[in-house]
Image (cartoon, rainbow, N blue to C red):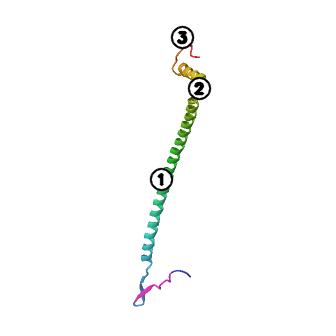
Amino acid sequence: MFGRKKKAPEIQEEQGNIKEIKTKKKKLNKKFLLLYIAGFVFLLYASYTIISQSVKINSRREELDSLKHQIEIVEIQNEYLETVKNYKDDDLSEYIENIAREDLDYVKNGERVFVNISGD
């Protein structure tokens, strides 16, 4: 109904016998074959591009999550340093003493240090 009109095949007769039928289907099939191949190649390229882009997106999301985690850590450290910065006389001396005892393993004069050698 819609589309191209089909031409009647050309028939050549040789003394009452049908010799040859010529049609233009072969040329149309070659054009459509090239079109199908081009479409297939395009689909392969599009699929490759989509897959590679999704891999890149996933790696960037992981990187973003890692950076967000690092930002949270730095914000917590900043809050801690702000509180330490606001320490006054007694609080500051207690803080310095705790740092010296726990981190630097210092002791006061006259203190005895007992070491648990059993590992518990």
Give x and y (percent) for residue 52: 47, 53
Q: Please, what is the three-letter code of the amino acid marked with disc 1?
A: Ser
Q: Provide the residue designation for mark 1.
A: 52
In magenta stretch: residue 12:
yes
Please identify the residue farthest to the right as the structure is shown. 90
- Answer whether labels 1 and 3 touch (C-beta < 8 Å): no
Q: Residues within 10 Å of mark 3 (few under 14, many from 20)?
A: few
Position in image of residue 45 (x %, y %): 45, 60
> Which amino acid, by three-letter code, is at mark 3?
Asn
* Residue at horizontal 52 percent and vertical 16 percent from the top: 106
Q: CA distance from mark 2 to mark 3?
A: 25 Å
Which residue is located at x 51 percent, y 20 percent?
104
Circle on res. 12: none
Q: Relative to 23, does residue 79 appear above or below in the rendering? A: above
Q: Residue 94 location, x and y as percent? A: 59, 21
Which disc is residue 109 wearing?
Answer: 3
Local secondary structure at mark 3: loop
Q: Determine crowd level at label 1: few under 14, some 14-19, many 20+ residues with C-alpha closer than 10 A.
A: few
Badge nearest the viewer, 2 or 1? 2
Q: Which residues are magenta?
A: 4-13
Q: Which residue is mark 2?
A: 88
How far across and how far down the image is residue 25, in percent?
Answer: 45, 78
Q: CA distance from mark 1 to mark 3?
A: 66 Å
Q: Main secondary structure of the magenta part?
A: loop
Judge depth for marks 1 and 3 and give the one in front: 3
The residue at the far left in this view is: 14
Question: Nearest the camera: 89 or 70?
Answer: 89
